[in-house]
Amino acid sequence: MKMIDSAWWSYTPALRIDNLLPRGLPLSAIMSVILMERHDINEKQIRAEYDDMQERNNFLKDMNSALAELRRNRPTDEHARVGYGAFTDSQGVRQDVHQWMLDNRIPIEQINNDRLGLQTEFDAAINNLKAAIDSANSEGQMALIRLQGLLDKVNQALELMSNLLSKDYKTKETIVGNTR
């Protein structure tokens, strides 16, 4: 029985709360550090979401420019073969509509690898591009919801830190008031 008691006694100091926390730091300071770290993590996530939204917005601008070019070049005669045209993208680079759509995996005709299309092929390309725009808009709305959630988390962390500091100040004020 003595051996069990001595074994238990050797482990109990490791279980004390002051051994789990850094020496000399009050609990409020440790919580503040944790909240600041969480705030930094949320800030990085917000920055990544924001950058992703910027890229998506630029891609949407490019898709709308390509769509306008397709509509402008669409032949009025159903038997005429016409080039799909070109546009200037959000980076200021001139893009061939046909190649740009292929590069961005938006379906467009590829018969004989020419860059000419019939009226029906233009219509199909326009519909495919509209579907891609709708998809990107839906993704953008979901990203906006995620961004709002992250901003809420940041606000909650800041509010919690403010409340923590306020309570810590009030506690110290009370202690000083009681010692007088």
Image (cartoon, helix red, strand yellow):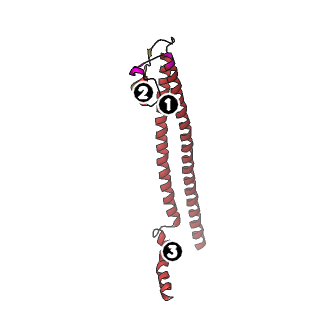
Query: Residue 15, percent across and down?
Result: 50, 74
**Residues under numbered marks 3 and 1 in contact, where contact means CB atoms less than 8 Å apart:** no
Label at residue 60: 1
Residue 170's place in the image compared with 112, above or below, is: below
Q: Residues within 10 Å of mark 2 (few under 14, many from 20)?
A: some
Is residue 174 shown above or below 36? below
The answer to whether residue 33 shows anywhere in this view is yes
- For disc 2, the marked residue is 100
> Disc 3 marks which residue?
16
Disc 3 from disc 1: Cα separation: 57 Å
Whether tag 2 and tag 1 are in contact, CB under 8 A, the answer is no
Q: Are marks 3 and 2 in contact (CB under 8 Å)?
A: no
Q: Residue 177 lies in magenta, yes or no?
A: no
Q: Residues within 10 Å of mark 1 (few under 14, many from 20)?
A: some
Residue 180 visible in the current orientation: no
Q: Which numbered disc flags the more N-terminal residue, 2 or 1? A: 1
Q: Which residues are magenta?
A: 110-120
| Horizontal and vertical percent position of residue 33 | 48, 59
Q: Position of residue 109 (x, y in %)?
A: 45, 23
Q: Amino acid at mark 1?
A: Leu
For badge 2, the amino acid type reads: Trp
Quadrant assignment, res 90: top left
Q: For the residues marked 2 and 1, what is the alpha-carbon distance in whole angstroms?
A: 13 Å
Residues 177 and 104: in front is 104
Indicate whether 52 appears above or below 14: above
